[in-house]
Image: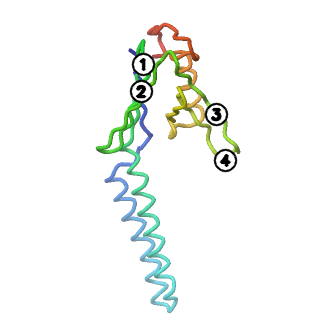
Amino acid sequence: MLTIRLTPNCSLTPHGAALFFGTICLVSFTIAGTLAALGLWPVFPFAGLEMVVLAWALAASLRRRHYSQTIVVTEEHVTIRTRFRQQYEQIEFARHWAQVKLRGADTNLHPSRLTIESHGRSYEVGSFLTEEERRALAKRLMRWVGRVNESPSLDYDADA
């Protein structure tokens, strides 16, 4: 049995985000308050709107730390378990019929898509990875899963 656990890189902690947000709010509202006192009051609502957008972006960034994917490859199956907070999703493919596909992006602005497919079902893995990480994962999975109607032996080599 071979296992790969994927998690997004979330180096920002909740405490760090709160400290960053507080500092930015202090600076922004100090400047906006000074300008409002000088008679440029329309600046203040826009500063508030900026802080609302910043809070939303920080919350979205912090939410990513609760997401993970685990790929388990056995002699018979390829199982993908996706977790987000308390929600779990699991999909299983027969290894003998599964295939790994790395689909290139339509434009340079979009990332490629790595999917595991079998019998008309498809599941994307590693959507949060960088291009290089996604390509390396695709190579590893292609070596472990093989092509349709092919099941290479699961050797426990050094890159596992």
Q: Give the quarter of the image for residue 71.
A: top left
Label 3's element?
Answer: strand
Camera-nearest residue between 120 and 27 = 120
Residue at 35 percent of width and 59 percent of height: 19
Residue extending farthest front: 119
Residue at 53 percent of width and 26 percent of height: 119
Q: Position of residue 95 (x, y in %)?
A: 48, 18
Which residue position holds label 1? 77
**Front tag of 3 and 2:** 2
Q: Position of residue 26 (x, y in %)?
A: 39, 71
Disc 2 packing (10 Å; few <14; some 14–19; many ≥20): some
Q: Quadrant of the C terminus?
A: top left
Camera-nearest residue between 19 and 151 = 151
Type of amino acid under label 1: His
48 vs 122: above or below: below
| Label located before the other in sequence (1 or 2) | 1
Left or right of residue 39, residue 18 in this image: left
87 vs 22: above or below: above
Which residue position holds label 4? 109
Mark 3 → mark 1, Cα distance in angstroms: 22 Å
Label 1's element?
Answer: strand
Q: Give the quarter of the image for residue 73.
A: top left
Disc 3 packing (10 Å; few <14; some 14–19; many ≥20): few
Camera-nearest residue between 80 and 9 = 80
Type of amino acid under label 3: Arg
Residue at 31 percent of width and 53 percent of height: 15
Label 2's element?
Answer: strand
